[in-house]
Amino acid sequence: MSRAEVNATEDVSTDVSTSAAPPGPGAARATEAHVPDGPSVESRRPSPLWALGLFRSELVTVVRRWRTLALLGVLAAVPILIGIAVKIETRGGGTAGPSGGDGPAFISQVTNNGLFLVFAGLAATLPVFLPMAIGVVAGDSIAGEANSGTLRYLLVAPAGRTRLLLAKYASVLAFCLLATLVVAASALAVGALLFPLGEVTTISGTQISFADGLVRALAIAGLVALSLTGMAALGLFISTLTGSGVAAMAATVGLLITVQILDQIPQLHAIQPYLFPHYWLSFADLLRVPVYWDQLVKNLELQALYVAVFGSAAWARFTAKDITA
Amino acid sequence: MIETHGLSKRYRGGQLAVDGLDLTVPSGSIFGFLGPNGSGKTTTIRMLMGLIEPTSGTARVLGSPMPRAGRTVLPQVGALIEGPALYGFLSGRDNLVRYDSADPTADPRTRASRVAHALDRVGLAAASGKKARAYSLGMKQRLGLAAALLQPRKLLVLDEPTNGLDPQGMREIRALVRELAADGTTVFLSSHLLDEIEQVCTHAAVMTRGRLVVQGEVAELSAGNRGRLAVTTPDPADAARLLKERGIADVTVDGDRVTGEVPPDAVELAELNAALVHGGVRVRAFGVERASLEDAFVALTGEGFDVAG
């Protein structure tokens, strides 16, 4: 939450809370006796930490839905399936597939080192499953509340439109990180259980220690989560356009699939560098020695651009919208 | 408490939902806001709460302009707008916790006790752990009211608060509204139930087709209509003749009921009754039927309580 927001809240509090009474209904009732005009409500001061409270409330509300848990369950299941499939395939003692085959990235190395299941799991879920889960949560964030009517009560509470939008976006970002970590943790557990762990052979062919590999795995999980921020902003914007949670989720996921298809058509190479998933799989460059920064930086710049454009579009739309649901 | 000048809202379809509203809600009143469905009540409430932007005109709530001063005004206002809205997958208590954490002025340290108190006040303490999805309409309505009572409020805006409640629940809510008003809270109550407004409210305003027809004290509004003299008798023809001879205007016969305008105060009603009996009319019932707010409403709007087109 921005610093200006918090300061503004405190400014408001200084001109209303002249009495030294501590906040709370008990205090309010005590002053009531002296003020015949009505219940004393002025003595309540906005807490500087309240924005954090709203964010926490958002996150708890998101995580407590069965739908969210089901999404996380599907995400956790993907590395498990990959791990079991590789294990069955290589039971005879051979290596998985022809060496250097065209299968999903990193799969062939999983048998040698369970840590590679983390990279394989993230590479498998990043194109579809992860962004789909983000699309559902981001698309539902505003539109779902409008649909159930709870949005109007949050706004008259008053949550404040800018602050509610920021809390919503922050909770979607937290969900991005959570979803990525669920995939990574599940992959690491399955990898450690089914395959040997040890020194990691990088894409460049050099060896790095297991601890170094683990650090890079964590960095890659963070990078994957950051790769999803543009998609999250897009979903949030779509969510402010409609009063139907299902419509917003469907539109966001539909747009994701369309963009993924556009990114595969060679004739469209001119626009492809501007499509948000274009550099997603560049996270593999973190496994090179030395690291290739070129594509990684491009990916982060592109995500920042999407966040800026669709974040401000969502803000402009949401703060000027008539809430009739 | 609430003051609007020329408040208007035209929706994008071109429909004028609220047209030049000049509303004044005095401090400390229980203000009844009446009108048929589709007359613009809810649009007005949404503009007062800063949910929708007026097309023209101004609105002041607690002396501050809305929607600009929402951040300072709204924490002092409890609202129930167009029925309750709840998170079905959360318990009743967690719904209130969620709404309370959206209020920047709410103290998290006292949250649990305030939530418990609000639940207790609307009679939901026993069902607070149940998922809101399993609540009946009346229970949802009560939970919505509890959300409006999480903090001490200066103004309560209640849109159809007794909707979906059984008669016992309606009485409880009415008693609660009176109790809150006695504490000094101004209550702005919208309803389509005329007798509810009449029983609870001190002031009232009537809207039809986006326009304000009348506003003022409830006593004054119904005083404008003097009521009817009514006689129930098995001899309606004789009764009507005798009443006309005594100078009663606008005598009408409907089955065994004869009604007419109430005579001027100089006429003693007991003598009128005696005259009827003396004339051989068998009187079963005799009296003046008090004018209700409903009569006043029909007289003012010249229409029934139908949906405006």
Image (spheres, coloured by chain):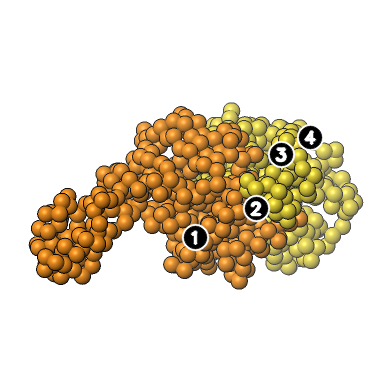
Chain colours: A yellow, B orange
Dot 4: within a 10 Å radius of its alpha carbon, few (fewer than 14), some, or many (20 or more) residues? some
Q: Is residue A220 visible?
A: no
Nearer to us in this view, A236 or A159: A159
The residue identified by callout 2 is: B151
> Quarter of the image holding residue B244?
bottom left
The residue identified by callout 3 is: A16
Please tell me the numbered disc located at residue B174: 1
Residue B11 falls left or right of residue A24: left
Task: Pinpoint the chain carrying mark 3.
Answer: A
Q: Amino acid at mark 1?
A: Arg
Disc 2 element: loop
Q: Are marks 4 and 3 in contact (CB under 8 Å)?
A: no
Give me the C-alpha separation between circle 3 and circle 2: 16 Å
Q: Amino acid at mark 2?
A: Gln
Give me the C-alpha separation between circle 1 and circle 3: 32 Å
Q: Are marks 1 and 3 in contact (CB under 8 Å)?
A: no
Dot 3: within a 10 Å radius of its alpha carbon, few (fewer than 14), some, or many (20 or more) residues? some
Q: Is residue B232 visible?
A: yes
The residue identified by callout 4 is: A293
Give me the C-alpha separation between circle 4 and circle 2: 54 Å
| Residue at 15% across, 54% down | B246
